[in-house]
Image (tube, rainbow, N blue to C red):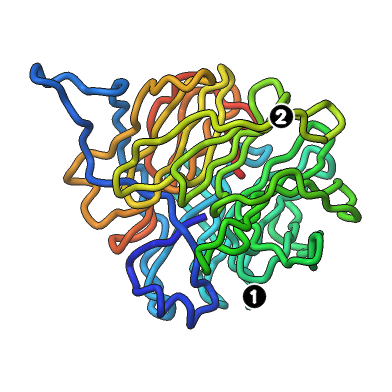
Amino acid sequence: MRRLPTRPLASLAALGMLTLTACGVETAGSPADAAGRPVGGRTIPAHALMRLTDVHEQTGMTLLEGPTFDENGKLLVVDVTAPSGEPKVLRVDVRERTGQALHTDDRGTYTSAQFSPHDGRVYLTDFSHGDIVSLAPDGTGRRVFFSGEVDGTPMNPDDLAFDRDGNLYVSDSVGMSEGKATGRVVRIDRDGRRATVLADGLSAPNGISFDADYRGLWFSELTQNRISYLLLDGEGRVASRHTAIRVDGGIAQTDSIAVDADGNLYQGLHGRPAMAVYSKHGEHLATVEIPARAAQGLESATNVAITPGGKRAYMTVSGPAGGYLFAFDALAEGVRQSNGG
């Protein structure tokens, strides 16, 4: 999820979205040594595919998130700050570079999207209202899948991931607006009847994704600039937890996470339109960068979807200049873990 600094936070509070956080990046261009070679991994250039949204007059911003491919190869994208009546979920033909409205309503503040392997519906996290809703692939048939308290506390669900059986794993950023380390990772059974806290005491947890083998979960904490690993026992319970990667983001903070077929992590950054790429062992492999001229007016690179079975990747980037899709070549092929969340 994201906090896009195109408006004062007080204005966001009036919208009921005080703590929406945006993947972002600092200025374009990687640090270099005396010979001009990039430091801390190579640079992967990204180019603008299309502008998908303009800044909304009512909310003063646009913020694209949760890119996920449907079974027909169309890319679904959510606009977190879209007001009532304007598209909150869009469907994009990346080959034709065209987009169309798929869904809108008068309630949701949707921060992520992903298709369930259980029922084939697309699931959305409503950050402001604590709901998880689902839609048919054509955008119709809205249902509330989960709502209410978990262990006595309402959620602020940000991103989500599915296991192979269709159970949901959600980053819950509850407490972020007060600056409290009360965030959680929550598991919800695929029927929506049981919710279990897997980790708590977290500082604005944001990105979440299974590793390539579904053995554990990567999750990021926005206000700690760290990525942790939650090893699971095969029954959805926690076997161990540790801090895995500390991100040297400067003014940028850790946002959403995607994982490719080789297990590499693509870490979105709030505060800079770029993305850091790490190996599963914590090595900084690369930084996805937008050329300086194209980066003007862009402040947030929230998330990425890598084409299933291919390496073409599509990154959601937003700012005062609008909401864009940028394309780049990933290090490995796309899988479910690199398709939404």
Residue at image position (56%, 17%) is 262
Residue at image position (59%, 22%) is 309
Q: SS of the residue at dot 2?
A: strand
Left or right of 298: which side holds 193? right
Residue 121 versus residue 80: which sits nearer the camera? 80
187 vs 2: above or below: above
| Image location of residue 335, percent across then percent down | 62, 27
Left or right of 130: which side holds 290? left
How far apart marks 1 and 2 lie (CA) works out to 37 Å
280 vs 31: above or below: above
Q: Say which residue label 1 marks.
A: 107
Residue 216 versus residue 128: which sits nearer the camera? 216
Left or right of 295: which side holds 211? right
| Image location of residue 109, percent across then percent down | 59, 67
Q: Nearer the viewer, mark 1 or mark 2?
A: 2
Q: Is residue 144 visible?
A: no
Residue at image position (43%, 80%) is 58
Q: Say which residue label 2 marks.
A: 240
Q: Is residue 85 visible?
A: yes
- Marks 1 and 2, the one that precedes in the sequence: 1
Q: Quadrant of residue 107?
A: bottom right
| Image location of residue 61, percent across then percent down | 39, 69
